[in-house]
Image (cartoon, rainbow, N blue to C red):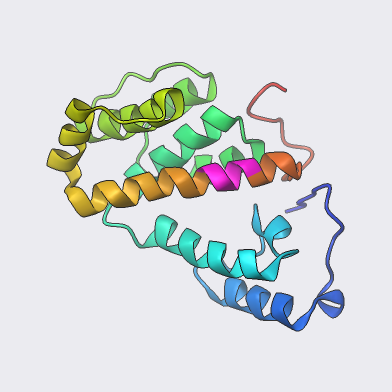
Amino acid sequence: MDIQSRLTPLQPNQMSEDQQRVLAEILKGPRGNLDGPFLAWIHSPALADHAQRLGAFCRYGTALELRLTELAILTTAAWWRSQAEWQIHEPIARRAGVCDSVIEALRQQLTPTFTRPDEQCVYEIGQSLYQTRRVDTALYDQGVALFGEPAMVELIGVYGYYSLVAMTLNAFDVRRDPDTPLPFDE
């Protein structure tokens, strides 16, 4: 897949030892590629090193079902209108069980109709964070009842991490396959 950005492309023979070390760690991890924000972060190996470990946890290590993590990621991608984040995670979310109607509503910046209370709660927590920068007591209590306190902490971490991803992708104009239509108008 052709991935482009406004940053200077780095070739392995041009990378510092720290960049090469971080690249090797990313490539041997669960991602297996230098995709998405890592194209930007590798320019700062210290940031890339910390971010890739946090990202691996947020994507693969939380107590949340993958379906719920991917819903949070798509909610974030839609909020930020992050083209590459959406393109990367939309097929993953679909395979994880997020239904087509929810995915399409998010893409169109509409409020989805949910059939699962856990998905409704994940979405509402994200919307609350993005719109008010807070989660009110009733919604917080609902999240704790559904997921438990540790998973609530992790869910907030997922929203924070993927906001960082979205901002990175947007700021550095990271694009996936230029022949694929963009999910969001610009």
* Left or right of 167, for residue 151: left
Residue 122, image quadrant: top left
Above or below residue 13? Residue 35 is above
> On the rendered structure, is 108 left or right of 124?
right
| Quarter occupied by the C terminus | top right
Task: Pick out the residue farthest to the left.
Answer: 145
- Verify whether residue 111 appears in magenta: no
Range shown magenta: 163-167
**Magenta span: chief secondary structure:** helix
Depicted 115 relative to depicted 70: above or below: above
Is residue 88 among the parts visible in the rendering?
Answer: no
Give the x, y percent position of residue 124: 32, 27
List x then y, in percent, for residue 112.
38, 20
The image shows residue 144 at horizontal and vertical percentages of: 17, 42
* Of residues 160 and 98, the one drawn nearer to the viewer in this rendering: 160
Placement of 8 over or under 146, stated as above or below = below
Identified at 73% across, 45% down, the residue is 174
Horizontal and vertical percent position of residue 28: 56, 77
Which of 169/136 is in front? Answer: 136
Which quarter of the rendering shows the N terminus?
A: bottom right
- What residue appears at the point 41 percent right and 48 percent down from the top-left corner? 158
Residue 153 visible in the snapshot? yes
Residue 10 appears left or right of 114 = right
Measuring 70% from the left and 79% from the top, which residue is drawn there?
Answer: 18
How many dots with numbers? 0
